[in-house]
């Protein structure tokens, strides 16, 4: 051990090997003469590395490193031009295919019985991906149904987002795995994937034998049960699909399954030859920060830009960025009737509502009709354009869905089906409160300040 310099009785120099064995709290010594802290070089290096790593992780989790859509999309054709459907299919990836049949399922009383029937009917395979899976009666019921099919020899593959399933009873996981089901928690924290912690799968997919598919806004939790009869039972919509588009739904599931497991599931049990089940046109597409993260925003921008008569948007989390606001404003100014339903006072994330309301000024001034659903939490994620295009899936109308989450949407091009969705939208409007420009301007000062503060957290607003 080397002695301290004269007049520096409390500062002791240690060899490197001794320093590494010294408790961290003894690395620091007070300099009596100069009244300041002295830090050994190794401690400074460790601190610098830790701070740098933290900064890198924050940047990695808030950005994808890709170029984003920065300019408005030019209006070249209306929604009734064949070029619109052609462009949507080619730009978003999977082609638009015919021969599909669709069934809309409104609220849990219709959604869960249909999903359970689908699970019980499985003969070969079940693939299931979801964000929310919480403890409760419906969670246990679904776990039992999947386990029973796995024990019966059906290949069951379950992909749960690690964050979204954090409230899931671990008994369900044990039950599923003991039955032979393969269960993976997507992006579970691990030192090799720290840069992906903010990349969550928000997709909601259930595919039975590669022939029947379900998608929409519903998670597995008791909040989605019932018929939106009170504030404890949410309003939501899901869709059942039969026909060739189900093959695309299965491919979307496989995208994340391969990322999570490295295992490719293929062959006729997963991708059978599918005969026409109807005459509907549709395609299923996805987005992810690891590739094509702008696809969802691109879809919305193209649909809004092509709209001629009407846009009916049901959005659980409506926090549009400036580019999207401008597209909606331009549509309203050229005579498109734009109606938006968002949650009212019943919402699971208050800050989202405040950030949303902060962005309404230009929309209301342009004539956009804004509504807040009153009875309960409004969790729908549906857009209907010109009573022709219906898009439904996991995507929220916010930057997180557009930039960070893994999302999946089903686009349906069918006028009769679109009219049916418009009628459902009208029923929701009847249970909502319209917010006028005057109402928005008269909201309390405290509310305005809070909205501005929350909006600052999103630089896109």
Image (cartoon, rainbow, N blue to C red):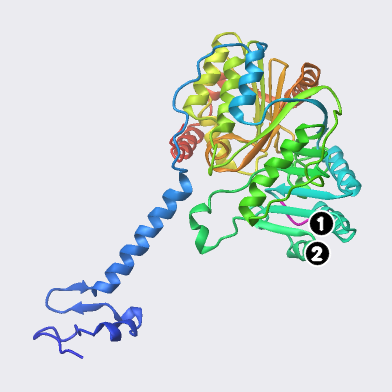
Name the N-terminal-most of marks 1 and 2: 1
- Nearest to the observer: residue 54 or residue 67: 67
Which residue shows up at 74% across the image and 48% down it?
Answer: 266
Query: For the magenta stretch, what is the residue range?
Result: 133-137
Dividing the picture into quadrants, the one containing residue 104 is top right
Q: Confirm whether the magenta stretch covers residue 42.
A: no
Secondary structure, mark 1, is helix
Residue 27, percent from left and from top:
29, 79
The residue closer to the viewer here, 250 or 296, is 250
In the rendered structure, the answer to whether residue 443 lies left or right of residue 282 reads left
Spatial distance from mark 1 to mark 2, Cα to Cα?
Answer: 7 Å
Quadrant for the N terminus in the image:
bottom left
Q: Which residue is mark 1?
A: 143
For residue 103, above or below residue 166: above
Provide the secondary structure element on which disc 2 rests.
helix
Please say if 376 is above or below 418. Answer: below
Residue 394 visible in the snapshot: yes
- Which residue is rendered at x = 60% and y = 59% of the image? 188
The structure residue drawn at horizontal position 34% and vertical position 85%, both measured from the top left corner, is 21
Count residues near mark 2 (Cα–Cα under 10 Å), then give few for <14, some for 14-19, many for 20+. Answer: some
Indicate the position of residue 248 as horizontal and vertical percent values: 72, 36
Circles 1 and 2: CB atoms closer than 8 Å = yes
Locate residue 78: give its quadrant. Answer: top right
- Residue at which label 2 appears: 175
Q: Percent x, y for residue 77?
A: 59, 11
Please say whether residue 235 is visible from this viewpoint. Answer: no
* Magenta segment main secondary structure: loop
Q: Is residue 135 magenta?
A: yes
Task: Establish if 407 lies above or below 125.
Answer: above
């Amino acid at each position: 051990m080397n002695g301290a310099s004269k007049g520096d009785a409390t500062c002791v120099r240690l060899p490197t090997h001794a320093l590494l064995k010294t408790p961290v709290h003894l690395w620091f010594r007070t300099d009596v003469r100069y009244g300041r802290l002295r830090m050994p070089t190794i401690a400074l290096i460790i601190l610098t590395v830790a701070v740098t790593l933290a900064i890198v992780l924050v940047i990695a989790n808030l950005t994808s490193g890709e170029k984003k859509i920065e300019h408005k999309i030019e209006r070249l054709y209306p929604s009734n031009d064949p070029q619109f459907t052609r462009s949507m299919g080619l730009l978003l990836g999977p082609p638009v295919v015919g021969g599909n049949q669709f069934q809309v399922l409104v609220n849990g009383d219709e959604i869960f019985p249909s999903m359970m029937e689908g699970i019980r009917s499985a003969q070969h395979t079940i693939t299931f991906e979801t964000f929310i899976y919480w403890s409760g009666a419906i969670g246990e019921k679904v776990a039992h149904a999947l386990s029973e099919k796995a024990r019966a020899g059906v290949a069951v593959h379950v992909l749960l987002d690690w964050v979204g399933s954090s409230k899931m009873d671990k008994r369900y996981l044990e039950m599923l795995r003991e039955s032979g089901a393969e269960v993976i928690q997507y992006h579970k924290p691990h030192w090799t994937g720290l840069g992906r912690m903010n990349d969550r799968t928000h997709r909601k997919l259930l595919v039975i034998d590669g022939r029947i598919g379900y998608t929409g806004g519903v998670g597995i939790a008791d909040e989605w049960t019932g018929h939106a009869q009170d504030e404890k039972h949410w309003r939501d919509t899901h869709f059942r699909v039969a026909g060739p588009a189900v093959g695309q739904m299965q491919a979307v599931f496989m995208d994340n399954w391969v990322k999570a497991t490295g295992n490719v599931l293929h062959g006729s049990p997963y991708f059978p030859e599918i005969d026409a089940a109807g005459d509907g046109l549709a395609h299923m597409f996805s987005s992810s920060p690891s590739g094509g993260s702008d696809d969802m925003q691109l879809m919305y921008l193209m649909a809004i830009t092509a709209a001629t008569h009407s846009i009916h948007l049901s959005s659980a989390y409506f926090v549009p960025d400036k580019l999207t606001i401008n597209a909606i404003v331009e549509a309203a100014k050229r005579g498109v009737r734009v109606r938006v339903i968002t949650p009212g006072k019943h919402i699971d994330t208050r800050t989202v509502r405040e950030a949303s309301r902060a962005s309404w000024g230009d929309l209301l001034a342009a004539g956009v009709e804004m509504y807040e659903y009153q009875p309960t939490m409004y969790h729908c994620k549906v857009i209907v354009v010109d009573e022709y295009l219906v898009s439904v899936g996991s995507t929220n109308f916010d930057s997180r869905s557009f930039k960070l989450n893994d999302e999946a949407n089903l686009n349906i091009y069918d006028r009769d089906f679109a009219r049916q969705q418009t009628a459902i939208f009208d029923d929701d409007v009847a249970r909502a409160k319209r917010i006028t420009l005057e109402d928005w301007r008269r909201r309390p000062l405290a509310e305005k300040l809070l909205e501005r503060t929350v909006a600052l957290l999103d630089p896109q607003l």
